[in-house]
Amino acid sequence: MPTYCDHARVQVIAHDDNGEFVECLDCREIFESSELDGSERKEDLSDA
Ligand SMILES: [Zn+2]
C-alpha cells in the first residue's frame, strides 16, 4: 500500500450546504471535494 495517495479517483457520496463529500476509491478516505481544489500541495514561492 502506498503511504501517500493523490486521491486521483474519487466518487461523490453526499451533498452538503458547503459542498460535496467525496470518497477516494484508492484509499477510501472521505473529504470535501472543495478540499481537493484548495488543499493541493502548492510550491508557492511567495516568500521570495
Ligand atoms: Zn486517496
Image: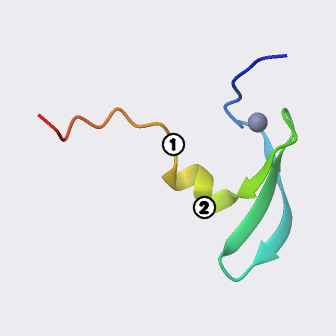
The crowding category of the residue bearing disc 1, from other C-alpha atoms within 10 Å (few below 14, some 14 to 19, many at least 20), is few
Name the quadrant where ligand 1 sits. top right
Location of residue 22 with respect to 3 vertically, above or below? below
Colour logic: rainbow
Left-right relation of 40 to 32:
left
Where residue 34 appears, as percent x and y from the top left, is 60, 61
Image quadrant of residue 22?
bottom right
Q: Are marks 2 and 1 in contact (CB under 8 Å)?
A: no
Q: Position of residue 11 (x, y in %)?
A: 83, 52
Horizontal arrangement in the rendering, residue 15 relative to residue 36 (left or right): right
Position above or below: 12 against 42: below
Q: Residue at x 85, y 69 (%)?
A: 14
Position in image of residue 27 (x %, y %): 84, 34
Image mark for residue 34:
2
Q: Amino acid at mark 2?
A: Ser
The disc placed on residue 40 is: 1
The three-letter amino acid code for the residue at tag 1 is Glu
